[in-house]
Image (tube, helix red, strand yellow):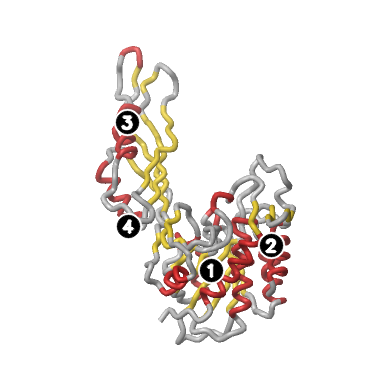
Amino acid sequence: MRIERAISLLKQMIATPSPSREEGRVADIIEAELRALGFEPQRKGNNVWAAAWAFDENKPTILLDGHIDTVKPNSAWVRNPYEAVVEDDRLYGLGSNDDGGSVVALLTAFTRLAKTEQSYNLIFLASAEEEVTGVGGVRAVLPELGDIDFAIVGEPTSLQPAVAERGLLVLDCVAYGKSGHAARNEGENAIYKSLQDIEWFRTYQFAKPSPLLGGVKMSVTGIEAGTQHNVVPAECRFVVDVRVNECYTNQEVLEEIYRNVKCDVTPRSTHLNSSSLSVEHPAVRRLVAMDREPFGSPTLSNQAVMPFPTLKFGPGDSARSHTADEYILLSEIEQAVELYSALLDGLKLR
């Protein structure tokens, strides 16, 4: 697969709206492309994958994952988000940077590697619902793929290897008081009762900071209380966004929170855990030899739901994701193909 074909495929993807849970038409495009390239794609929902060679149970398995869903365009777009436009080295369009560039670069490298024998099984996956971490996305596919020993998750990382990624907890918290008339100083004000816990979330430092990601970050991002000016509120509800470093599981962080606050705390989910990969992993060591610099990523990806070693690595800049007039550089895609190919050709996991 030549780079020109990869860019043409990316233009087709941009021209085909694929918000999360509505990726069917782009999945059709990827499935047809895999068939045209001589592979035998499989599909579950809007996820499409193919193996490079016949499976050999004596070899480890590497997964190449890029997601085909996008966020919806925001109102600040000046360009048509569904029109792929090239200006100099820039390719504009929704999903160009997040995550179409990675998808087509991984697919191009996959087709190159499929022409040679390697010491591993290789699977390319175009996954759905990444932006919402939906149950119909990569989580639905993993049971179909068998044991995975290592995965490259294609995301815009400026072609630097993200060897750690933050997890996420969103907490719904409620402090309870007792209603009363404000003029008579009656009741127990739930807002006042919540202040101690809110201050704890603002100031508490977990014992284990990460050299790559820093400490666990907790931010109160919403608060709601009261029905009218003269009634002391009986409930104060607030939301806390918790970004977990790779030194903790989400459950460990939750247990620490439960021990320290008095309000009721209910996590919306606990499955979006942090992840990390040793810098001694063969893939990381090879990338370092290519002058790539490992770092820790604050943003979530499909790594959060992959229970095996993963590396986030791909073309584009995370700062361009979810922004108006999103773009990727053509040179970034071309460089990604070469780096993916060089990384994987001859890589030995065992």
Q: Closer to the N terminus: mark 2 or mark 4?
A: 2
Closest to the camera, between mark 1 and mark 3, is: 3
Q: CA distance from mark 2 to mark 4?
A: 37 Å
Task: Check whether the beta carbons of the residues at disc 2 and disc 1 lie within 8 A of each other.
Answer: no
Closest to the camera, between mark 2 and mark 3, is: 2
Circle 4: is it few (<14), some (14-19), or many (20+) Cα within 10 Å? many
Circle 2: residue type:
Leu
The C terminus: image quadrant: bottom left
Residue at position x 60%, y 73% in the image: 109
Task: Residue under label 3, please give it.
Answer: 195
Task: Residue under label 4, please give it.
Answer: 247
Closest to the camera, between mark 1 and mark 4, is: 4
Which is more toward the observer, 301 or 163?
163
> Residue 108 in the image: x percent, y percent?
63, 72
Residue at position x 54%, y 75% in the image: 342
Q: Closer to the N terminus: mark 2 or mark 3?
A: 2
Q: Closer to the N terminus: mark 2 or mark 1?
A: 2
> Residue 197 in the image: x percent, y percent?
30, 36
Which is more toward the observer, 330 or 33?
330
Circle 3: residue type:
Leu
Task: Residue under label 1, please give it.
Answer: 141
Circle 1: residue type:
Val
Position of 314 with respect to 273 (left or right) is: right
Position of 154 with respect to 264 (left or right) is: right
User: Which numbered marker is on residue 10?
Assistant: 2
> Residue 251 in the image: x percent, y percent?
33, 55
Q: Name the quadrant containing residue 100.
A: bottom right
Circle 3: is it few (<14), some (14-19), or many (20+) Cα within 10 Å? few
Which is more toward the observer, 111 or 27?
111
User: What secondary structure is marked by label 4?
Assistant: loop
Circle 2: is it few (<14), some (14-19), or many (20+) Cα within 10 Å? many
